[in-house]
Image (cartoon, coloured by chain):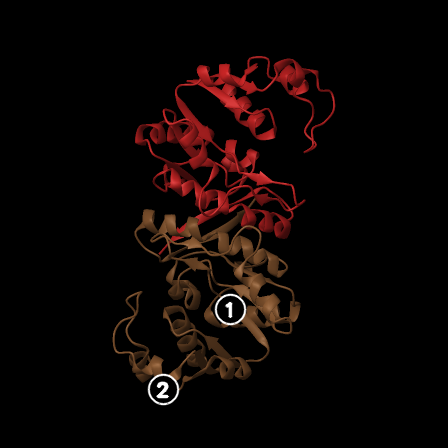
Chain colours: A red, B brown
Amino acid sequence: MRIGVLGTGMVGRALAGRLAGLGHDVVVGTRDVNQTLARNEPDGMGNPPYAEWQKDNPEVRLVLFAEAGAHGELMLVDVANPLDFSQGFPPLLSVANTDSLGEQIQRAFPDARVVKTLNTMNAYVMIEPTRVPGRHSVFLAGEDGSAKESVKGLLGEFGWTEEAIFDLGGIRAARGTEMYLPLWLSLMGTLGTGDFNIQVVKA
Amino acid sequence: MRIGVLGTGMVGRALAGRLAGLGHDVVVGTRDVNQTLARNEPDGMGNPPYAEWQKDNPEVRLVLFAEAGAHGELMLVDVANPLDFSQGFPPLLSVANTDSLGEQIQRAFPDARVVKTLNTMNAYVMIEPTRVPGRHSVFLAGEDGSAKESVKGLLGEFGWTEEAIFDLGGIRAARGTEMYLPLWLSLMGTLGTGDFNIQVVKA
């Protein structure tokens, strides 16, 4: 599949590297290619410069956002959380309750088939669910059923089983998965690690 | 333990009945005792009139909020979600992201030792966790460690095991457990039942 990953941070790198390793044709989009490659300091989150990662992943081309968007197959997988660090740590959400990032993206790109998924765990668990033992869950939200089926396929390639995937319905359900973030942050503090997930258990 | 339950709806009844059954000295608080007992129609959520429940639970006295508060042991267990049905179903939250109901209650009653818990599941699972098979989790948030220990004891009486209980820290963590509500509602829609819960799974 031709896939454009938007964002050069830890999550974008993890997804792009994993997808390329699975044989997909992957580009990463950024605002300014030269600027991104010229950075030689760790970013604000402590990630090494993109150029270092690029050396280990030469098959993934860095391109402008617009080119990355055009490269992808008219499906937009949103794995982001609308983090607002303006009040320090822990972050607030920049949108919540009456709207969500997923809904904003779908409204901004009405022709894109937006699928919200994977934003309820860290990037390592996203791409390698077996890091966390036993059963645990991942959520999907989006308006387009066939786009969700394609994303299910990608999740399957990452190692997510059929029973682990919960389709929550339309893109409005992105609100729930984004608003789970504060609980995730509290649990990370309590557990002392971000390598965890939640499992839905039904009676 | 002397316990005052504030609220005569489904959740209040479930907790009061269960706690009384366990041998606790329980009263239920309401705004107007006569009015509550005079109702003979199901409430807006379809629950039978309180007077019917009262017949089956004669040991639980119905009193004014203030009396219920005085009856309790200076510990306030908040199991509520700040539901806002003004925009219809699914409800929004009346407070989220920058504040929570748990924090509001603690600010309003600075001398009460507020503990937020049990608000991440339906009332049946709260009081009888074995309804949902296998392991699943419950959260605690509050400023007072000894109050949280007391609540852990009550949770244990309901059937929650030690490993199932996650102490998330201070009352601010109530935000996370309340903001989980939209995800819970989506899952209820997907699963077709409210008899479920989430389990925290660590690497």
- What residue appears at the point 32 percent right and 55 percent down from the top-left corner? B193
- Identify the element where label 1 is drawn: helix
Residue B110 badge: none
Of all chains, the one bearing label 1 is B
Q: Position of residue B3 (x, y in %)?
A: 51, 79
- What residue appears at the point 53 percent right and 36 percent down from the top-left corner? A125
Q: Nearer the viewer, residue A178 or B164?
A: A178
- What residue appears at the point 54 percent right and 64 percent down from the top-left corner? B116
Q: Position of residue A71 (x, y in %)?
A: 45, 15
Q: Which residue is mark 1?
A: B155
Q: Are marks 2 and 1 on the same chain?
A: yes
Q: Residues within 10 Å of mark 1 (few under 14, many from 20)?
A: many
Quarter of the rendering occupied by the C terminus of chain B: top right
User: Could you tell me the amino acid type at mark 2?
Assistant: Pro
The reply to whether dot 2 and dot 1 touch (C-beta < 8 Å) is no
Mark 2 to mark 1 CA distance (whole Å): 24 Å
Quarter of the rendering occupied by the N terminus of chain B: bottom right
In the picture as drawn, the residue positioned furthest to the front comes out as B86
Residue A48 lies, with reference to residue B77, above or below; the image says above
In this rendering, position of residue A86 left or right of residue A122: right
In this rendering, position of residue B106 left or right of residue A40: left
In the picture as drawn, the residue positioned furthest to the left comes out as B41
User: Could you tell me the amino acid type at mark 1?
Assistant: Leu
Quadrant of residue B40 in the image?
bottom left
- Residue A22 visible in the shown view: no
